[in-house]
Structures are given as C-alpha cells and as structure tokens.
Image (tube, rainbow, N blue to C red):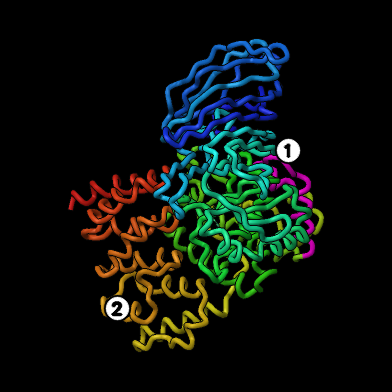
Amino acid sequence: MDEFSYAQPNRVRIADLELNLRIDFSTKQISGTAAYDLDWIDQAATELVLDTRDLTINKVEAEVADGTWTPLQFALAPADKILGSKLTIQTPERPAKLRVTYTTSPQASGLQWLEASMTGGKRQPFMFSQSQQIHARSWVPLQDTPQVRFTHSAQVRAPADVMVLMSADNDPKKLRDGDYRFKMPQKIPSYLLAIAAGDLVFQPISARSGVWAEPGMAKKAAEEFADTERMIVTAEQLYGPYRWDRYDILVLPPSFPYGGMENPRLTFATPTVVVGDKSLVSLIAHELAHSWSGNLVTFATPKDGWLNEGFTSYVEGRLIEALYGAERAAQETVLGRNELAQEFQRIDPKLQVLSLKPGAVADPDGASSSTVYVKGAWFLQFLEQRFGRDHFDAFLRGYFDHYAFQSIPTTEFLRYTKANLLDKFPGKAIEKELEQWVYEPGIPDNAPQVRSRALTEVDTARAAWLDSGRLPSPRQTRRWNTQQWVHFIEGLPKTLKLEQLNRLDNAYKFTGTDNSEIAQRWYPLTVRSNYRQARPAIAEFLQRVGRRKLIMPVYEALVDSRDGLAFAKDIFAVAQPGYHPITTGSVQALIAQAQPAQKAQ
Ligand code: BES
Ligand code: ZN
C-alpha cells in the first residue's frame, strides 16, 4: 500500500503516457491532454482513479474505435491538503486508451515559473518541474505512486525562442522553434517525470554527456562537471551498463529547491555547486548513481526511501573514492556521519529507522533525512566490510539486474540479501544484525568507523585557535578544501564572541562567501552570536538562493534568536516571489511555528 496515492494499481495500471501540452508563460499554466494506454488487471473494475492537485479537468474521453473518442463521466473530490484531489473516472468498458484534457494552476506545487528578470540572462522566462515526492500530480493527472512505471512521449509547444527539455531523449542539436517532441522508451515512475523550459543552451562534456544551462552558466558548469564521463565509466564497471542512453545535466536557476534531482537522462542540478574547484561534484556522482539505485531499482513507497537514497549515497561514495581517492571519500563520509549524530539528538527514535512505519510521516516531502541517506549508506558499508568488496560489489550488481525496472519494499531487499549474501557466505553476518539496521533506531555499536586525515588536521587547528587564540596560518589553510572549511565551522562552539567572529572574518572572509556550503554553516553561527555585521550578507544570500537545505538552517537560527524573527519575516517577504513553492512552504511553516513562542516571552 502506498498511503500517499489514491491510485489502485492492483486494478489497473498506466503503461504509457502521451502528453500534448502548451506552456503559457503569461498565465503560468500548462494545458493540454494526457493520453494513457491502460493495462486492466481487474476485469471487474469499473473506475479509473488518478491523482491530481490543483488541476482543472476539462474533459475525459475514451477511445472507442480507431481515432474516435467518447466522453466519460468523472468526479474530482475535494482536495486533501497533502494528497490533492482524487479523480474518479467511470470506465464500465475498461477502455485500452483514455485521455484527459486539463490545465494546471499557476500555483502548481510541482512547477516553478520565473519571470525573465529572475533568471541569470534576463532574456527569457523560465519554468521547471520538481515531481518528487508527490508533485507530478500537480502538472499531470496520473497514478502518482512509484509502484506504477510507464513509458512516455510528448509534444510540447512553447514560445519559439524558448528551449524545452524533458526526462526523455533531448537532442543536443535541437534548434528552437517552439515545437518539441520527446520519446522515452524506458519505463519510469511518476516522480521522475520532468520538464523544463527557458533560455537553455548545450555544452558537451563527452559523446554521451553534457550540460544544459543558461548561456552565462553553460561553459563554467561543463568545466566543473568535466569528470562526469569518468564517473559514468566507473559506475558501469561496478554495476553494469548505463541503461538510459544519454546522461545530461540541466543547471537550473538558484531557486531550485534541491541540490539535485535524478530525472532520467537529465539530472536537474542547483547552480550552487558550481564553485570553480570541483569540490562539490559529489552531487553529480550522487544523481548519476541514481541511474542504478532509484531509477532502475525503485522504492515501493517513500517509506522505503533508503532503498533510493541510502544506496545512492553508498554508490556516490564509491565513485568519489574511485575518482578522487579514499581520503576525499572519507571526508564526505565523516561530515555526513557528524550530521547524522546531530540529527539523532533531535529526532524521534521512530524516525531513526530505515524502514518507516505507515503513518510515521504525514507529508512525504518530510521523509528525507540524514537517517535515510547516511544511515542507509552506513548499512551497506557495514555489509561491504563483512562480506568483502569483491563479493559485495558482485552482489549489488546482481541486485540491480534482478530488480531492474521494478519497485520493491525493504522486506524484498532483506529477502534477496538473505538468499544471495547471508546464506551464500555463511558466518559473515546474521539476519538479526540486518534487522537491527533496518528496524531499530540509532547505529549498531559494531558499525565500521571512518577517519579522515585532512579533517583531523582541521580539528587540531581549530582546537589550537580556541585554546591559544592563534589562527591557522594562511600557508596551511591555502590548501584547505570546502570539506575542511565546513568541518572547521561545524566544530566551533555554538556561539562565539564578536571579537572572535571578527578575527575569523578578517582572516578568511566567510561573510559574503560565494561558497554556499560555507554560508549555510557560518551564517547561523553569526546569528546565534548576534554578530550584526553579517546581516546584509545574510539578506543577500537568502534572496539569491532558494535551495532548501542551504537556507533553512539560516532561517531556523533567525527565528530562534532574540530579534531575528522580524528580520527573517522581512527578508522572506522580499525573497518569496523568487522561491519555489516547496521552499516557500517550509519557510512559511517555520515562521508560523515561531510566532506563538515569541509572543509568549
Ligand atoms: N532524489 C533526491 C531529491 C529529493 C528527495 C527530492 C526527496 C524530493 C524528495 C536527490 O537525489 C538528492 O538526494 N538530492 C540531494 C543531493 C545529494 C548530493 C545528497 C539534495 O538535493 O540535497
Ligand atoms: Zn538522491
């Protein structure tokens, strides 16, 4: 059961989706038709139930004879705040082909519309989708559950000077003409359906890989992501052929609410990782890794999120190790595990398990956490340690082949692992240990540990400064990478004296940094320490960047501080028109929650 969808996949399944859409920037709407090939499983079924959110449904028709369509009765239920509106279509004849004519809302939760003035080049407007977790239903009526996979094709019309891309066969040489056709022969679940439109140009990385971005960003991004082909080759050596043909990266405007999204053939990425030194390219390793873990073998419901994100974080680590060495991989592992330890201090034990119980989270957008990513990866690192790399690599490759293009729950993973790992190599691990990782909170005591030499050096330097007031010398810090700076700041006390913050700023120019991984950690520290000088830079940061993970810690520190709530509200009022609906929702919820507490003081 997928509690986040109204669909009834054991009665009927969408096998193919054919979209015919028009993108209207002036009204911020997509309109057109979605036509489906249906596989009726239950021969007594009389209804087709689809997921929708904020859609206007104009008509529903079934194909009766070749090319002849007849209207069907339908009803759109009142909207549930999280799930949207159940669309029930009367289908007494169980048609093989059905189509829905519809229009999206300008507020569609899965789309962001940017005026030309809000883009880098300021020449064309921009629109992009973010369907995961359950936002595909806000731009296409469909069975919005990962348990249904379908092929898709599309014809999309847009203003002639705007380029359109999809989670499909984008042609690097395609000229802009306002009429775009797409075909996607591989079956994907709804959360991977994607579309973007804007002033987008292509810059190749290799024969099968490249960057799409606004003209001012394309070359820079292609240089930052120059190692992508090596990442693909490495992943193929480990886990078998890349099955999706091209692998391109679309660099979005800074309002993209996530770091990356593994849309098939076309990863969506935040521009905040283009920092000039390749230090944040593990994001690409991560999204590419999803081509095996997630897109090929998919979780059955968002409650099994670790099957996508934990596996992917594990594979990401393997790619980083192969390309940049074990020390760099260790740095990322240590930083992730430190964040996990912080999270465990904060969150309910029932959210510290890999396989969530039904009802554990109300909104699946909140199901993602360090537990899912870092504990999930740690579990696989534990298995790798117990069974040895050779056996474990072969096992994972077999797993990806065995379940290719399927969706599975955690119990299926456990069954497969028992049969193909535990029973095959007896004496290495027992079922109880696996169950502890999956069903118990926290981390088992015998979990493998990792150390990073470069981060230990940072610990020593930080301790020396806090002890004696002597800052690490530029000769030393010149060689520090993003991960080391992040670690330096994360290990500082919760608050510092103004004079200490001043010295750090004078030496290292944290305030105003264009490295948002540093900004994300430095600004909350300045807020907690009431270091007012940073406020203009904070305001600039929160207005420029909309990536949720980067800006939420800053807003959280602000609403917790003595007079930061008013400042946070002021900035949010200015920044909000540029934020994605997902980011807007998170900030709004935080501010609403903060208010009563402030009043009570
Ligand atoms: N699939 C996720 C993004 C996601 C998860 C969107 C859950 C909606 C709900 C993507 O692969 C991801 O994990 N992105 C990370 C980047 C990464 C390097 C850990 C992000 O956006 O921070
Ligand atoms: Zn991911």
Percent of width and height locating residue 365: 48, 44
The residue sitting at 71% across, 56% down in the picture is: 430
Mark 2, residue position: 502
Percent of width and height locating residue 58: 50, 19
Q: Is residue 182 left or right of residue 463?
A: right
Disc 1 is placed on an element classified as strand
Residue 493: quadrant of the picture: bottom left
Mark 1, residue position: 185
Name the N-terminal-most of marks 1 and 2: 1
Res. 481 visible in picture: yes
Q: Which amino acid does label 2 sit on?
A: Asn
The residue sitting at 52% across, 54% down in the picture is: 214
Is residue 527 within the magenta segment?
A: no
Disc 2 is placed on an element classified as helix
Q: In this view, does 13 lie above or below 571?
A: above
**What's the magenta region?**
390-416
Q: Which amino acid does label 1 sit on?
A: Pro
